[in-house]
Amino acid sequence: MFAFAALVALASSALPTVFAHGGVLAYSNAGNWYQGWAPYNSPDGQTSIERPWSTYNPITDPTDPTLSCNDDGTSSALQLTATVAAGSAITAYWNSPWPHAIGPMLTYLAQCPGSTCTGVNSDSLQWFKIDEAGLLSGTVFSGSWADGQMIADNSSWTTTIPSTVPSGNYLIRFETIALHSLPAQFYPECAQIQITGGGNQAPTTDELVTFPGAYSSTDPGLDIDVYSNAAQTETTYIIPGPPLYGSGTGAPAPPPSSTPTVSVPASSPSSTPTSAPTGPTVAQYGQCGGQGYTGATICASGSTCTVVNPYYSQCL
Ligand SMILES: *[C@@H]1O[C@H](CO)[C@@H](O)[C@H](O)[C@H]1NC(C)=O
Ligand SMILES: [Cu+2]
């Protein structure tokens, strides 16, 4: 009898928990509609641009191994990729109405090595943040948040792919973080896109992060009690994660390796060397050229100075 009552109690408490959470169920871009992965259906036969995910429950530990795309990081058997133009807007739709109005919205990109993201584990990628919004007005305690705006906007969030991002294959990671209780709740899902017509602004080294790795439970934007006395007068909220793409101060990062690069000299020599160049050498994978670079330009034997982008040449 007791066991039966306990089971009933369990069942009835489990349901509202499921419906109080959720994730990204669909995407749209340039008039195209992309149905997302259905986490509670069999994976067999599912075709979606969204990476598989398996639960509506939040991730509550920033070191959780599923933090990149809310699963084990793999693509699906019939994984699709959407072609998305740089400079275009892409919208993610959560289950509606989304229940959590307090917290920030964040969107990240990660470029995949090679010619497709299919088969690339999202845990192995380096992510940069292309969109973020936190406390929009008022105080931490009673102000309005990006999460509330997401709910008001049909439980959806629209991010513009920067036109400066290099063309290539990417995962896009939309995330809403809920701060109504501690620990903070992370709701990230990813989709596979091929960005076309892009620019040549590589993210800088300090803009790139891994998931897990980007967040810590002691980050001021995560370790925050929105009901505290301090929150009633606090009007500043620090969004977690790296500096936004375009605001980092590090060197431009080389693209993910295994992409074939064309080998050309890092700088045009002022005179044609008649014998093998001498001078300090740069070890393999070191920087050997690029705008503003003044260091050694001769690569250790076995490697060639290769232009990665206008700001960075590397011994490869
Ligand atoms: C609101 O979102 C739903 C999906 O959750 C979508 O089917 C519908 O078209 C959206 N409405 C508008 C006005 O964008
Ligand atoms: Cu929830």
Image: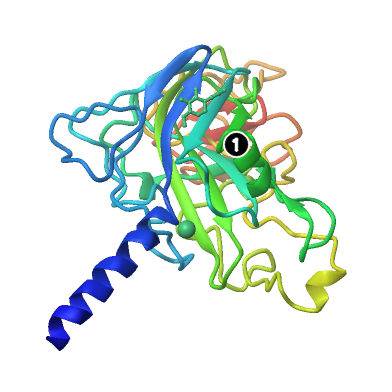
Of 5 and 224, the residue lying toward us: 5
Which quadrant of the figure contains the N terminus?
A: bottom left
Q: Is residue 263 visible?
A: no
Q: Is residue 57 visible?
A: yes
The tally of labels here is 1
Question: Viewed as shown, does residue 189 lie left or right of 135?
Answer: left
Q: Secondary structure at mark 1?
A: strand
Q: Quick check: is the Cβ at mark 1 less than 8 Å away from ligand 1? A: no
Which quadrant of the figure contains the C terminus?
A: top left
Of 225 and 20, the residue lying toward us: 20
User: Which residue is at 76% across, 60% downward?
Assistant: 237
> Which image quadrant is residue 130 in?
top right
Residue 137 image offset from top left, x and y in percent: 83, 50
Question: Viewed as shown, does residue 92 lie left or right of 235?
Answer: left
> Which image quadrant is residue 103 in?
bottom right
Residue 119 image offset from top left, x and y in percent: 25, 35
User: Which residue is at 35% across, 23% downward?
Assistant: 81
Farthest-out residue, bottom: 2
Question: Mark 1 highlights which residue?
Answer: 288
Residue 36 image offset from top left, x and y in percent: 35, 32
Farthest-out residue, front: 1
Of 42 and 203, the residue lying toward us: 42
Residue 120 image offset from top left, x and y in percent: 31, 38
Q: How is the image coloured?
A: rainbow
**Label 1, residues with CA under 10 Å away: few <14, some 14-19, many ≥20:** many
Q: Is residue 221 above or below residue 95?
A: below
* Residue type at tag 1: Cys
User: Which residue is at 64% across, 68% downward?
Assistant: 219
User: Which residue is at 82% across, 76% downward?
Assistant: 230
